[in-house]
Image (cartoon, coloured by chain):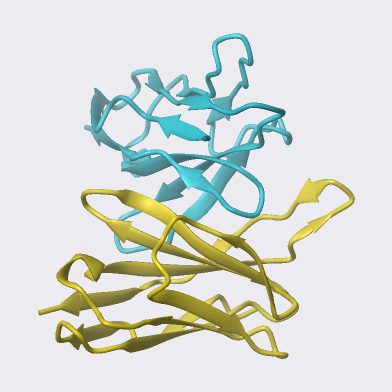
Amino acid sequence: KAGVTQTPRYLIKTRGQQVTLSCSPISGHRSVSWYQQTPGQGLQFLFEYFSETQRNKGNFPGRFSGRQFSNSRSEMNVSTLELGDSALYLCASSLGIAGGLTYEQYFGPGTRLTVT
Amino acid sequence: AQRVTQPEKLLSVFKGAPVELKCNYSYSGSPELFWYVQYSRQRLQLLLRHISRESIKGFTADLNKGETSFHLKKPFAQEEDSAMYYCALGRRALTFGSGTRLQVQP
Protein backbone atom coordinates (compact mmCIF):
# COMPACT_ATOMS: atom_id res chain seq x y z
CA LYS A 1 0.00 0.00 0.00
CA ALA A 2 1.15 3.51 -0.69
CA GLY A 3 1.89 5.50 2.42
CA VAL A 4 0.45 8.81 3.53
CA THR A 5 1.38 11.56 1.11
CA GLN A 6 1.50 15.28 1.79
CA THR A 7 1.77 18.14 -0.64
CA PRO A 8 3.58 20.37 -0.99
CA ARG A 9 6.67 19.20 0.87
CA TYR A 10 8.08 22.69 1.30
CA LEU A 11 6.40 26.07 1.30
CA ILE A 12 7.52 29.63 1.92
CA LYS A 13 4.91 32.24 2.66
CA THR A 14 4.81 35.82 3.87
CA ARG A 15 3.16 37.05 7.05
CA GLY A 16 -0.51 37.78 6.52
CA GLN A 17 -0.93 35.32 3.67
CA GLN A 18 -2.92 32.11 3.89
CA VAL A 19 -1.84 28.58 3.05
CA THR A 20 -3.50 25.27 2.27
CA LEU A 21 -1.79 21.95 2.90
CA SER A 22 -3.00 18.65 1.54
CA CYS A 23 -2.90 15.10 2.86
CA SER A 24 -3.81 11.87 1.10
CA PRO A 25 -4.31 9.02 3.56
CA ILE A 26 -3.57 5.37 3.07
CA SER A 27 -6.30 3.72 1.01
CA GLY A 28 -9.13 2.57 3.27
CA HIS A 29 -8.21 4.86 6.14
CA ARG A 30 -11.02 7.18 7.14
CA SER A 31 -9.35 8.99 10.01
CA VAL A 32 -6.93 11.82 9.31
CA SER A 33 -5.14 13.78 12.02
CA TRP A 34 -2.93 16.84 11.75
CA TYR A 35 -0.02 17.77 14.00
CA GLN A 36 2.29 20.75 14.19
CA GLN A 37 5.94 20.15 15.04
CA THR A 38 8.20 22.98 16.17
CA PRO A 39 11.53 22.99 18.04
CA GLY A 40 9.99 24.91 20.92
CA GLN A 41 6.62 23.23 21.38
CA GLY A 42 7.33 19.80 19.93
CA LEU A 43 4.53 17.78 18.38
CA GLN A 44 1.09 19.26 19.01
CA PHE A 45 -2.27 17.93 17.90
CA LEU A 46 -4.26 20.22 15.63
CA PHE A 47 -7.39 18.31 14.67
CA GLU A 48 -8.77 14.98 13.57
CA TYR A 49 -11.33 14.15 10.91
CA PHE A 50 -13.27 10.95 10.44
CA SER A 51 -15.69 10.44 7.59
CA GLU A 52 -15.69 14.16 6.77
CA THR A 53 -16.50 15.19 10.37
CA GLN A 54 -14.14 16.92 12.74
CA ARG A 55 -13.99 14.68 15.80
CA ASN A 56 -11.31 16.38 17.86
CA LYS A 57 -9.64 19.77 17.91
CA GLY A 58 -6.46 20.86 19.63
CA ASN A 59 -5.77 24.15 21.33
CA PHE A 60 -5.03 26.28 18.29
CA PRO A 61 -6.57 29.58 17.23
CA GLY A 62 -9.40 29.74 14.72
CA ARG A 63 -6.92 30.70 12.00
CA PHE A 64 -6.21 26.99 11.75
CA SER A 65 -8.96 25.04 10.04
CA GLY A 66 -9.34 21.86 8.13
CA ARG A 67 -11.69 19.70 6.19
CA GLN A 68 -11.98 16.19 4.86
CA PHE A 69 -13.44 15.12 1.56
CA SER A 70 -15.54 12.08 0.74
CA ASN A 71 -12.45 10.23 -0.51
CA SER A 72 -10.85 10.83 2.93
CA ARG A 73 -8.29 13.28 1.56
CA SER A 74 -7.84 16.17 3.93
CA GLU A 75 -6.71 19.75 3.75
CA MET A 76 -5.71 22.16 6.43
CA ASN A 77 -5.74 25.89 6.03
CA VAL A 78 -3.94 28.57 7.99
CA SER A 79 -5.10 32.12 7.44
CA THR A 80 -3.31 35.36 8.30
CA LEU A 81 0.02 33.62 8.73
CA GLU A 82 2.30 34.63 11.59
CA LEU A 83 6.01 34.01 11.96
CA GLY A 84 5.26 31.54 14.74
CA ASP A 85 3.34 29.33 12.31
CA SER A 86 6.64 28.23 10.79
CA ALA A 87 6.71 24.52 11.48
CA LEU A 88 6.61 21.03 10.10
CA TYR A 89 2.98 20.02 9.63
CA LEU A 90 2.41 16.29 9.87
CA CYS A 91 -0.60 14.37 8.73
CA ALA A 92 -1.44 10.89 10.02
CA SER A 93 -4.06 8.44 8.88
CA SER A 94 -5.60 5.42 10.53
CA LEU A 95 -8.59 3.13 10.44
CA GLY A 96 -9.85 4.95 13.53
CA ILE A 97 -11.26 3.17 16.54
CA ALA A 98 -13.32 -0.01 16.46
CA GLY A 99 -14.39 -2.34 19.23
CA GLY A 100 -12.43 -0.31 21.75
CA LEU A 101 -9.20 -0.78 19.80
CA THR A 102 -7.33 2.28 18.63
CA TYR A 103 -5.74 1.62 15.29
CA GLU A 104 -2.20 2.74 14.56
CA GLN A 105 -1.62 6.18 13.11
CA TYR A 106 0.61 6.24 10.03
CA PHE A 107 2.44 9.49 9.50
CA GLY A 108 3.27 11.30 6.31
CA PRO A 109 6.61 13.00 5.59
CA GLY A 110 5.27 16.42 6.53
CA THR A 111 5.06 19.82 4.91
CA ARG A 112 7.74 22.27 5.99
CA LEU A 113 6.14 25.73 6.16
CA THR A 114 8.36 28.78 6.52
CA VAL A 115 6.72 32.14 7.17
CA THR A 116 8.86 35.21 6.48
CA ALA B 1 -5.18 18.06 31.09
CA GLN B 2 -3.13 15.17 29.86
CA ARG B 3 0.61 15.52 29.72
CA VAL B 4 3.60 13.41 28.73
CA THR B 5 7.06 14.08 30.10
CA GLN B 6 10.30 12.74 28.70
CA PRO B 7 12.97 14.15 30.99
CA GLU B 8 16.00 13.39 28.84
CA LYS B 9 16.63 15.24 25.59
CA LEU B 10 19.63 13.10 24.78
CA LEU B 11 20.69 9.67 25.90
CA SER B 12 24.08 8.43 24.77
CA VAL B 13 25.13 4.82 25.35
CA PHE B 14 27.66 2.39 23.96
CA LYS B 15 26.70 -0.54 21.79
CA GLY B 16 25.69 -3.49 23.93
CA ALA B 17 24.74 -1.37 26.93
CA PRO B 18 21.21 -1.40 28.37
CA VAL B 19 18.89 1.42 27.42
CA GLU B 20 16.02 2.96 29.32
CA LEU B 21 14.11 5.90 27.86
CA LYS B 22 11.90 7.46 30.48
CA CYS B 23 8.29 8.51 30.01
CA ASN B 24 5.90 9.77 32.66
CA TYR B 25 2.34 10.75 31.99
CA SER B 26 -0.52 12.59 33.59
CA TYR B 27 -4.01 11.39 32.71
CA SER B 28 -7.25 10.75 34.56
CA GLY B 29 -8.72 7.50 33.36
CA SER B 30 -7.29 4.50 31.57
CA PRO B 31 -4.44 5.72 29.40
CA GLU B 32 -3.51 4.39 26.02
CA LEU B 33 0.24 4.78 25.58
CA PHE B 34 2.58 4.45 22.63
CA TRP B 35 6.22 4.78 21.71
CA TYR B 36 6.96 6.29 18.32
CA VAL B 37 10.39 6.35 16.69
CA GLN B 38 11.87 8.52 13.98
CA TYR B 39 15.04 7.29 12.31
CA SER B 40 17.19 9.73 10.39
CA ARG B 41 15.41 10.97 7.25
CA GLN B 42 12.45 8.68 7.85
CA ARG B 43 8.87 9.22 8.94
CA LEU B 44 7.57 8.98 12.44
CA GLN B 45 6.45 5.40 13.00
CA LEU B 46 4.89 3.38 15.76
CA LEU B 47 7.35 1.26 17.72
CA LEU B 48 5.04 -0.29 20.26
CA ARG B 49 1.90 0.25 22.30
CA HIS B 50 1.13 -0.76 25.86
CA ILE B 51 -1.87 -2.94 25.10
CA SER B 52 0.05 -5.21 22.76
CA ARG B 53 2.66 -6.12 25.39
CA GLU B 54 5.04 -7.23 22.67
CA SER B 55 8.74 -6.78 22.12
CA ILE B 56 9.61 -4.91 18.95
CA LYS B 57 13.24 -4.79 17.78
CA GLY B 58 14.17 -5.93 21.29
CA PHE B 59 12.36 -3.00 22.95
CA THR B 60 9.74 -3.45 25.64
CA ALA B 61 7.70 -1.00 27.67
CA ASP B 62 5.61 -1.69 30.74
CA LEU B 63 2.81 0.52 31.89
CA ASN B 64 3.13 1.31 35.61
CA LYS B 65 -0.08 3.00 36.66
CA GLY B 66 1.14 3.55 40.21
CA GLU B 67 4.15 5.53 39.04
CA THR B 68 2.34 6.80 35.92
CA SER B 69 5.27 5.68 33.81
CA PHE B 70 5.78 3.90 30.51
CA HIS B 71 9.54 3.58 30.20
CA LEU B 72 11.07 2.05 27.07
CA LYS B 73 13.79 -0.52 27.64
CA LYS B 74 16.22 -2.61 25.67
CA PRO B 75 18.82 -4.85 27.28
CA PHE B 76 21.51 -4.47 24.61
CA ALA B 77 21.58 -1.36 22.44
CA GLN B 78 22.53 -1.58 18.76
CA GLU B 79 23.90 1.21 16.57
CA GLU B 80 20.80 1.02 14.38
CA ASP B 81 18.70 1.99 17.42
CA SER B 82 20.03 5.54 17.15
CA ALA B 83 16.96 7.68 16.54
CA MET B 84 14.48 10.10 18.09
CA TYR B 85 11.98 8.43 20.40
CA TYR B 86 8.62 9.92 21.37
CA CYS B 87 6.25 8.73 24.04
CA ALA B 88 2.59 9.48 23.25
CA LEU B 89 -0.70 9.30 25.09
CA GLY B 90 -4.24 9.22 23.78
CA ARG B 91 -6.57 7.64 21.28
CA ARG B 92 -7.65 9.89 18.43
CA ALA B 93 -5.69 12.93 19.55
CA LEU B 94 -2.18 12.00 20.60
CA THR B 95 -0.29 14.02 23.19
CA PHE B 96 3.43 13.62 22.58
CA GLY B 97 6.35 14.07 24.88
CA SER B 98 9.23 16.29 23.82
CA GLY B 99 11.25 13.33 22.63
CA THR B 100 14.57 11.74 23.55
CA ARG B 101 17.40 11.37 21.08
CA LEU B 102 19.14 8.06 21.55
CA GLN B 103 22.73 7.86 20.34
CA VAL B 104 24.33 4.45 20.35
CA GLN B 105 28.06 4.71 19.97
CA PRO B 106 30.21 1.88 18.60
Residue A113 in picture, x, y percent from top left? 25, 77
Looking at the picture, how far across and down is residue B5, in whole percent?
A: 39, 29
- Relative placement, left or right, of A10 versus A46 is left
The image quarter containing residue B70 is: top right
Q: How many marks?
A: 0
* Residue A79 position (above or below residue A38): below
- Of residues B72 and A88, the one nearer the viewer is A88
Residue A55 sits above or below residue A78 on the image = above
Residue at 50%, 55% (x, y): give it: B45
Question: Looking at the picture, does residue B1 appear above or below residue B64?
Answer: below
Q: Which residue is painted at 54% across and 31% down in the image?
A: B58
| Residue B44, picture quadrant | bottom left
Residues B54 and A40: in front is A40
In the drawing, does residue A23 fall left or right of residue A77?
Answer: right
Instruction: Please provide percent x and percent y for residue B7.
Output: 31, 24
Q: Residue furthest left?
A: A116
Q: Position of residue A95 (x, y in %)?
A: 74, 65
Q: Residue furthest right?
A: A99
Residue at 63% across, 16% down: B65
Instruction: Give chain A's shade.
Output: yellow
- Quadrant location, the C terminus of chain B: top left
Residue at 25%, 35% in the rendered image: B103
Where is B23 relative to A71, above or below? above
The answer to whether B93 appears left or right of B52 in the picture is: left
Q: Nearer the viewer, residue B23 or B94?
A: B94
Foreground residue among B78 and A97: A97
The chain letter corresponding to cyan is B
Residue at the limit of the structure toward the top, as seen here: B66
